[in-house]
Image (cartoon, rainbow, N blue to C red):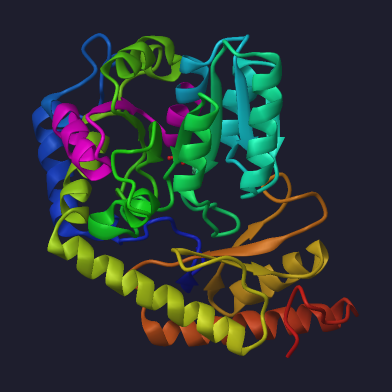
Amino acid sequence: MVVGISFSTQDYLGLSREPSVREAVAAALAEYGPHAGSSPVLTGHTPLSAALAAELSELTGMEHVVLFPTGWGAGFGAITGLMRRQDHIVLDERAHSCLSHGAHAATRNVTTATHLDHESVRERLAAIRKGDADNAVLVVTEGVYSMDSDTPRLRELQELCLEFDATLLVDVAHDLGALGPGGSGQVGAQGLLGEIDLVMGSFSKCFATNGGFVATRSREMAEYLSIYASSHFFSSALSPLQAAAALQSARIIRSAEGDRRRADLAQVSDRLRHSLAARHLSVLGERSAIIPVETGSVAVARLAWSLAERRGLILALIEFPAVPLGSARFRMQVMCDHRLEDMDTAAAVLDESLTEARSLLREPADASGSAS
Ligand SMILES: Cc1ncc(COP(=O)(O)O)c(C=O)c1O
């Protein structure tokens, strides 16, 4: 077992260690047992699932919520459930695997748009509508990109969709709960609560458990999805334990305690970004729970990862296929209860480890890594 400061755990609000979440899970275990027992369309759901859907509906400003046993299944199911072979999908080139696999499983008519480039989305939509005025078009993006910590301008994207009679799907896995007023994520932060066509999310970053959901204003779309999304219909439901953890987490996220945790998370994130930048490390993106750090070559990254671990720094090393072939980065993920002073220590250890790795491999420092 490795002991140290971990930046590799996706529990941004620290809710998996929160006593009231653990008590809710224990109560669900006593009442319902550990197993869903069947698909949600049979008897897989419990009253906890309905209460969870109601909380998510408040959090997203969308009336209808379909639950999935994993976030991956929610993204894949949302796209494959709604889109037909003759439909079209415009995918940001950095969209998560569940979205891109869903898109390619649904139709051959998939085009990728340059990352966060709305002009590129417009060009794709115009080209599609020039040749096909009738079939559906889905535009797919994320609230916060998990490898880059950057964000689209959602209002512009939603307006583009309206202009070209397309539907917008936003994956809020990394921002719902972690930021925005009341934990409403980038959708709330950009003043769009209840205005995005489709919102999908995961419980695995802020809701202390596995699972996911799709939220929509349309009853028809939710009903259609609950039948045609195979990862919903043909998969055992979210277990009662998952539902209990996510439900109690959602209640905290929407409370003053959630505000406190988000404020702490922002402070920790800013401190780590600041400490890394002060050491001239190359930090990508904007403030979120994700702090991506460029490393230079893959060889340097691998060696620095192991040197850092020996010094008590636990990091997620990201390589292909999560980032382009031949590149690597550390994806540092912070939690609200990380200690501020540990952020300075972490930056120093990472800097030392990268410098040592580069020296051992005789690679020069460059702009995409430590310069100190
Ligand atoms: C953007 C994004 N969407 C969806 C998922 C899938 O969620 P889960 O891990 O809960 O299945 C992830 C998790 O890695 C993610 O980063």
Extent of the magenta region: 49-77
Against 227, residue 359 (above or below) is below
Against 156, residue 253 (above or below) is below
Q: Is residue 178 magenta?
A: no
Residue 328 picture quarter: bottom right
> In the image, is 294 to the left or to the right of 96?
right
Q: Report if residue 265 is visible in the image.
A: yes
Q: Is residue 74 magenta?
A: yes
> In the image, is 30 to the left or to the right of 301?
left
Against 167, residue 249 (above or below) is below
Residue 230 picture quarter: top left
Residue 100 position, x and y percent, is: 62, 31
The C terminus lies in which quarter of the figure?
Answer: bottom right
**Magenta region, main secondary structure:** helix
Residue 235 position, x and y percent, is: 39, 17
User: In terms of depth relative to the viewer, which is nearer, 84 or 41?
Assistant: 84
> In the image, is 314 to the left or to the right of 11?
right
Against 320, residue 359 (above or below) is below
Q: Residue furthest right?
A: 362
Which residue lies at the image location 60% right of the left edge and 72% below the top edge? Answer: 309
